Amino acid sequence: MPKTMREKQRELREKEILDTACQLLLEQGFQKMNMDELAARVGIAKMTIYQHFSSKEELAVRIIVREMRMIEEEFASVFALECPALERLEQLLLKSFAFRSINRRVNMELSPVVIIQNPEYQAQRDRLAAQWAQLIEQAKREGAVDPSLSTPVLVRTLFHAFQADYDDLIKSGLASSEELTHTFVTVVLKGMSLSPGSRV
């Protein structure tokens, strides 16, 4: 059934709220983000925001879920590549670092319970985890990843690593963004890979 004009307008308004809130989160962080300022930037009344989102926390979690869905869409092209699974894992790791900024910022400031208990977040996290697990299992079958390593533990470790805070290293000049990404990806791939002498 086609959407009504009212439904389309509501979706567009919700997208504008999310887009603007995402920018505010990057600028100010969750704690300092002000709903009055958000409403002013969008050009709507504050109460209109609460017609879409019941709280500031719900809004933040919806931003995380939306970013995760964008990641899933971005990953689709990598999963479809016809190359060794380990090469696709490397591409996913590189892309994941590019997407990590907003989710890490919100995750650091928002209660983990608020995030983890959200049904939308749980469903999206499980979909992404299943995709990563499938690729790791394929890499194991190809003899590129150590089969003695637990796939669920590897996936969970990666998810936590993406949420870690490395900003102080970059701001202090101890590492560049390129060095951070290269080091992280290299450590992960070498850590899960079989040594050449161990491959069948």
Image: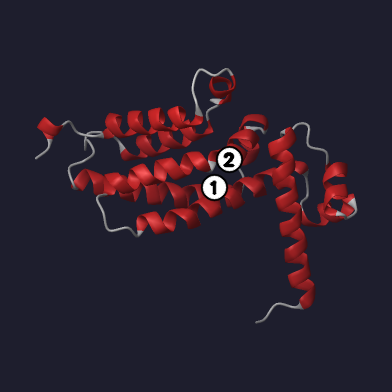
Labelled disc at residue 25: none
Q: Residue at x 65, y 38 (%)?
A: 114
Counting from the top left corner in percent of width and height, residue 174 is at 50, 17
Helix, strand or loop at mark 2? helix
Residue 123 vs residue 6, the one in the foreground: 6
Residue 176 in the image, given as x and y percentages of width and height: 50, 26
Which amino acid, mark 2? Ile
Q: Is residue 76 above or below residue 97?
A: below
- On the question of residue 30 being in view, the answer is no
Read off the residue under disc 2: 116
Give how far apart the Cα atoms at labels 1 and 2 are. Answer: 6 Å
Considering the numbered disc 1 on the image, is that residue within a helix, a strand or a loop? helix
Asked whether residue 141 is in view, the answer is yes
Q: Quadrant of the N terminus?
A: bottom right
Relative to 96, does residue 49 appear above or below in the rendering? below
Label 1: how many residues lie within 10 Å, few (<14), some (14-19) or many (20+)? Answer: few
Discs 1, 2 touching: Cβ within 8 Å? yes
Q: Residue at x 45, y 49 (%)?
A: 128
**Three-letter amino acid code at disc 1?**
Gln
* Residue drawn 71% across the image and 58% down it: 15
The residue to which callout 1 is attached is 122
Marks 1 and 2, the one that precedes in the sequence: 2
Foreground of the two, 179 or 5: 179
